Amino acid sequence: QVQLAESGGGLVQAGGSLRLLCEGSGGTFSNYATGWFRQAPGKEREFVAGISWSSDNIRYVTSVKGRFTIARDNGKNTIYLQMNSLKAEDTGVYYCAAIPNEMGLPRSEAFYEYWGQGTQVTVSS
């Protein structure tokens, strides 16, 4: 059983930056790729970025390309999401999720097996 815990959310002005962390534990975490998702008020949860265990496969949704960077430190079982040039539309609850590495990085949340509780990101305009 893999457990995930997000941290690093908060309130920031438009144009600012935040770094989210996702710490994994339990199970065989080394077999899993990780994705970041977000859910804005009144909207469905959407894929934001994903990274394979070996970091050789990285994917972003178009709206965050050039502003967000995903990375991982396997020695610390931690995945990072550096978010720069934040916009009001980036507001939402951000979740990390784990998927078996061999399944790639699909955008559909249905493929992800384990989820954290989420961390709130609020960008004021």
Image (tube, helix red, strand yellow):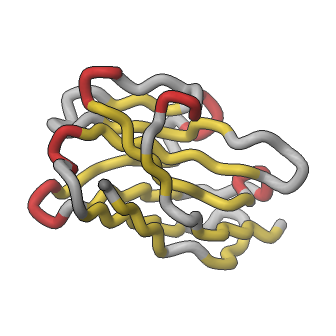
Residue 103 drawn above or below residue 70: above
Q: x, y (%) of residue 46?
A: 66, 38
The residue nearer to you, when weighing 85 against 61, is: 61
| Total marks placed | 0
Quarter of the image that includes the C terminus: bottom right
Q: Which residue is located at x 29 percent, y 61 percent?
A: 24
Residue located farthest toward the right when viewing the structure as drawn: 42
Which of the 4 image quarters holds residue 92? bottom right
Q: x, y (%) of residue 7?
A: 47, 74
Whether residue 93 sits left or right of residue 44 in the image: it is left
The residue nearer to you, when weighing 3 against 40, is: 3
Quarter of the image that includes the N terminus: bottom left
Q: x, y (%) of residue 5?
A: 42, 68
Q: Which residue is located at x 32 percent, y 66 percent?
A: 23
Residue located farthest toward the left when viewing the structure as drawn: 75
Q: Which residue is located at x 37 percent, y 47 percent?
A: 70
